[in-house]
Structure formats: structure tokens, C-alpha cells
Image (cartoon, helix red, strand yellow):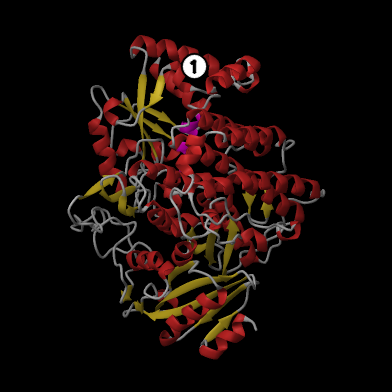
Amino acid sequence: MAILKIIKNSLLKGIVDLPRRELLPEAEQLGKELKQVIDRQFHGSFQLRQVSAGSCGACESEVQATINPLYDLQRFGVDFVASPKHADALLVTGPISRNMLLALQKTYEALPGKKFVIAVGDCAVNGGLFKDSYYTLGGVDQVLTVDLHIPGCPPSPTTIIKTLLGFLK
Amino acid sequence: MSIREELKKTIAPLAVNDRYPAESYLTVKPADFIPACLALHQLCASPVMMMFAEDKRATRSCFRLNTAFYSAAERHWYYACLDLPAGAESFPSLAKEIYSATLFEREIREMFGIELVGSPDHRRLRLHDEVWPAGAFPLRKDFVPLERLEPPTGQYEFIKGEGEGLFELPVGPVHAGIIGPGHFHFSVAGEPIINLEIRLGFTHRGIEKLMEGKTLAAGLELSERVAGDTSFAHGLAFCLAAEKIAGLTPPPRAVLLRAVYLELERMYNHINDIGGIALDVGFSFASAFASVLKERLLRLNEQLSGNRYLRGINVIGGVAQDLAGPVTLNPLLSDLNELEKILFNSASFIDRIDSTGILRQKTAEDLGVLGLAGRASGLARDLRTDLEPYSSAGFRPIVCTSGDCLARLNIRLQEFRQSSELIGRFIRQLQPGELTVNAPAPVAGYSLGAIEGWRGPVLYWLKLNEQGTIERCKIVDPSFHNWEALAYAAQGEIIPDFPLCNKSFDLSYSGNDL
């Protein structure tokens, strides 16, 4: 009986979608270009593994926002994966706390093939407000070779998508 | 009879400082320290809210130890203070008597090198033994950042469960999701969790040391980056402390606007967690729906203030800018009703969260659990009850008693609605007027700023010198009080329910690690 209820419901409601005004036109355009690049260069999917190396959490929140239905980065071929062994790139946030150094290096080593490193947020770019601390190493490029910097405190989802596109192009 | 008079019966303080409203500092003799703390603990019906040391060797050749308790009945903070002469830095451990002192004592030991006599737990919290050498104490004033670290030899010791069929399951610090780092060490017998030990500190950035020597403006900027999802509450607590020291009273319009922003922060985080709870039982549709609501709230924040995480609004003495547009929350509320219907109509969802991850009231009280997690276990404590503009709006905290994931979900749903009501009310009360008061010349002093963020009380104890720069800043995020509660709530649950339990608390890694 449950299935009848579901069918009735979907017939009555029709296709429920988000109001188009909430989708940012800029992000839409960027996404379409991004998809072409990813199709061409990465066989349709570009997978990221995120590591917080001492971030306050705002960058994670914005990275997370890029996959909510309003930006929906996944439909353009970018996704976040649980294992570094499935990833094309490492996305690092935070000013590299000493305690995270080993875990960061190990995660990097677990990436197969050509490894891209993306530093997201001012802290990951150069240590940000924490660069003078006794316990931070000050930016990802102190530890790994960084291919892409995405500055901002935190960078907005649109900035993240835009910078990623510029890089992959 | 007031707490002060009751206290007089057992303790004769060496000195009492009542300089700031709602705060009393009682300096006691070493022999009186434990009895004074125990008396305050009982009379205030409060866990150890903060416990921290100051290095005063340069002026008074001692370390000073402050232990704070809060009496909700008197709306008053009491501190038991003890001077530890330099050269013989040690004090009798309070943790044996009051459990909620344990983490604070471990923190003081690693940061100041002050020994604890008879402490049940000596292990380091944030300066991991594997990366930081022995004998370097960052919060001592004469600490010099080490150019090259001596190779450390230490090793953290986890509590091990032993026996037939028991095995250890280490998880982290890098987790599967887009989330902060922490290490969870499970001892399991098949699926059920026998013991969980949580090791944190992976996002330690040395914030309390970085605060030292900073101007108030720079300190405020840093405080907004202690815990990214609580930026506003952290900044506000910092400002409240600085304003109390300077004797500033922010104008009524600023007080109301701060409350509006504080509730907006609560709303976007609560909806984030409601979605997170749905995601962790595999209910992706509900979670995606919630993430749209969160994004709308973040965009609303940006429209109103220019920043999605409400940074840069607080200034010492008020707020930097007025609301830049109307606050329309009604569409969000009807979407929340829809979301609630979707969640509660799903029997399999309710089956997963009902009576999962129970934190009993007694356990919560013994551990000194605060804020939302405490209210879900029947502890009706909320600092907003005692603060303006909430108290004159007749604010009552929302409390559940079952202490499970469902209770923590229900609190969030109800607080989301309560916050939107409060916002409407505060906006109606707004009168035209100033947004800030001008700061006077720098004043030396020390005081506490306390506010109920969305997780619980955010506490900033600030000490300024004559130039108005920061001498010491002690930060306590509610996560520091509450992480251990997760370990108790997860006991006896199965491993696949752990992410759910974790999300239902949603504690901050960075707020805890500083």
C-alpha cells in the first residue's frame, strides 16, 4: 500500500525542484565549463579527499556547502571521497598543526598516481592568523608541493568552484 | 542565606575582590583550596566552569590558579584563587573530588609545568607526546618558541580493554567526511562498544599564547577564528569581557542586534546538525533538504551583515553595523515543519535515533556537561536565562529528559523555532539609536565574558595590562566540557551508531583544541 501512497503523492506534487532564483547564475556557468574540463582531462570525475590540518571549521563548512543542492558540485563531476586511495587530489584546510603533520603526510602518500594538492583558506595558504604560533607550521606548502591555493577566510563556495575551474582549465 | 555567608562558616579567604559586577574572586590559603572548591561546587550547584593558571612570576613571583563556579540562583561567578610560589609549583589535585576539574588540571600541567599532587590522570591533552618534547611549557611567560624541537620520546597511553573476544579499533584523526580531526579509540566486543577513549588536540594552534601581547582589536579577530561555526558567540564573549574591564555599557540597540545575530548563528548550526543526524542514518534526502535551509541562512547572514559566518560584526562597545535588510524567517519555518514531518514519518529513522546514545542525567551532572547536550539530559541550564535581552523577554530553556539522540534532535528542532521567535521579538523592540559607545583610554584589569553559544556556554577570561594589550586570555568552548560525554553515550552502542551519536552532540574539534 505504501507504494500507492508514494505514486499518488508524486502525481499530486509533480516534480519538486528548487526555485531557480536560488541557484547562482555565476556558479551555474562555471560548473558547466568545469564539467567540460573534467570530462576531457579526468575521464568525467575528479575526486577529492579533504584533510583538516588545524582548521577552525569554517573552511570545512564552505567546502561542504559546495555539494549542497544549491551548488551541487557533484553534478559537474567533482566529488569528495572517504578514502585517499580513491582520490585525484588532496584538499587541505588549516595552518598545519604539528599534531597533524604525520597524518597529513600519510594521507598524501596514500593518494595514487599524479597527486594534486589544493590548499583552501588563508590558514592553509600561508598560516593565516596562526602563522606565528609555536605549534603551527604555517601553510601547506611548508610540507607538500601545493598545486592550487584558494585564499579566503573562509573562501565562499562560489570562490572555491571558480578557482578550481581556473586551475583545471 | 547567600553563598558568601554560607562560605564564611567554613573558609576564611585571605582576600576578596568584588570589583566587577557578578564576579567574586576569593583568594584562599593552600590548605583551604580543596574545601573552598568543594563548598562552592555544592553551594553554586555548578561544575568547574573554568580552571586556569596565570604566570605572575615577574611581578608577584608566583603562579595564580583560578577555579570558577557559576551560581545560577545568584547569577554570580565565584572564583577560588590560590597563589603557588614560584620554584615549588604544585597544588593538590581537585579532580579526585570534582571530576569536571580533570581536563583543566591536565591542561594546566602541560601548559605551565605545574605539578598536580595526587592527580588521577597526568597525560597530556594538546601537546602530543609524539611531537612535543618534555619540559617546554608554552604558557609560561619566559617560554621561547623552539627553533628546533628535541626529538620527543613520549607515547600516549590509551586505556586498553583486555580479554577474550575484545579488540581495539583505532579511528582517525582523518575521518571519512569533510570534518575536523580527532582520534577515537574503541574497545569493542564484536559490534558493541565496551569503551571509547577520545584523543583530541589535533587542531591545536596555540591560540592562548597567540593572544598574549595582542591589542583588543587583534584579539577579537583571533577569537572569531577559534571555532568557525561559533564565530559570533566567541567574538561576543571576548567583547563582553573587554567591555566589563573598561566599564562600557553597549547601547540598547547593539544589545538587541547582538542577540539577533547570536540566534541566527544558533539556527544555521541547528539545521546543519538536524541534516547531519539524518545523513548519519543514511537518510540523504532529508539531509539534502536541511543543507538547503542551512545555505539559505548563511546567505541571509551575508545579506544582513556582509559575512556568512557573522565575522566582523562585533566590536568592543557594540556592533559595527546595522541590519542591512529585513530578516525574513517565515519561509524557513514552514520548510522546517516539512522537514520535521519527513523525518518523523520515517519509522526506520526514528528506530535508529530513539533510545540511541543515552547520556543519563546523573552522568551528565557528574561530568559537568553543559549547554545543549546537558539540556537534552535534563539539566535545565542556559546562560541566556540570566542575560539581557533574554531575561526580560521571559526566556525559558528547552529541556528534554531522555538524553538520547532523539532528545538532542528535538531540542534542536524546538530551539530553531524558539530562536526565530526571539529574533522577531528583538527586532520589534529595536529603537533608533547608537550602535557603539566610544572606548575610553586603555584600562588594566581582568574579567569574564560569558554567553550561551549554540553548543553551550562560551567563556572568555581576559586580563589586560596598562597599555590595554592582552596579558592572558583563557578560552573555554563548551566542547571542552562535553567531549567526554560522547564517550559515555556511545558505551554499549554498536559501532555503526557511533557517527550518529557523534553528530547528535556535534562538538567542536578546534574549539576544544584551541
The x, y position of residue A130, in whole percent, is: 42, 48
Going by the numbered disc 1, the residue's amino acid type is Gly
- Residue lying farthest to the front in this orientation: A1
Q: Is residue B10 above or below residue B82?
A: below
The x, y position of residue B413, in whole percent, is: 60, 44
Give the chain letter at badge 1.
A
**Foreground residue, A50 or B238?**
A50
Q: Report the residue at 61% width, 17% height from top.
A: A8
Q: Report the residue at 72% width, 38% height from top.
A: B327
Q: Residue B197 vs residue B69: left or right? A: left
User: Is residue B425 located in the magenta-colored stretch of the structure?
Assistant: no
Q: Report the residue at 38% width, 68% height from top.
A: B105
- Residue lying farthest to the right in this orientation: B432
The quarter of the picture where the N terminus of chain A appears is top right
Q: Report the residue at 64% width, 20% height from top.
A: A19
**Foreground residue, B123 or B146?**
B123
User: Is residue A61 located in the magenta-colored stretch of the structure?
Assistant: yes
Helix, strand or loop at label 1? It is: helix
Range of residues picked out in magenta: A56-65
Residue B457 appears anywhere in the view: no
Q: Residue B141 vs residue B118: left or right? A: right
Quarter of the image for residue A36 reads: top left
Residue B36 appears anywhere in the view: yes
Q: Which residue is mark 1?
A: A31
The quarter of the picture where the C terminus of chain A appears is top left
How would you classify the magenta stretch by its main secondary structure?
helix
Q: Residue B399 vs residue A89: left or right? A: right
The x, y position of residue A100, in whole percent, is: 31, 45
Q: Residue B247 vs residue B459: left or right? A: right
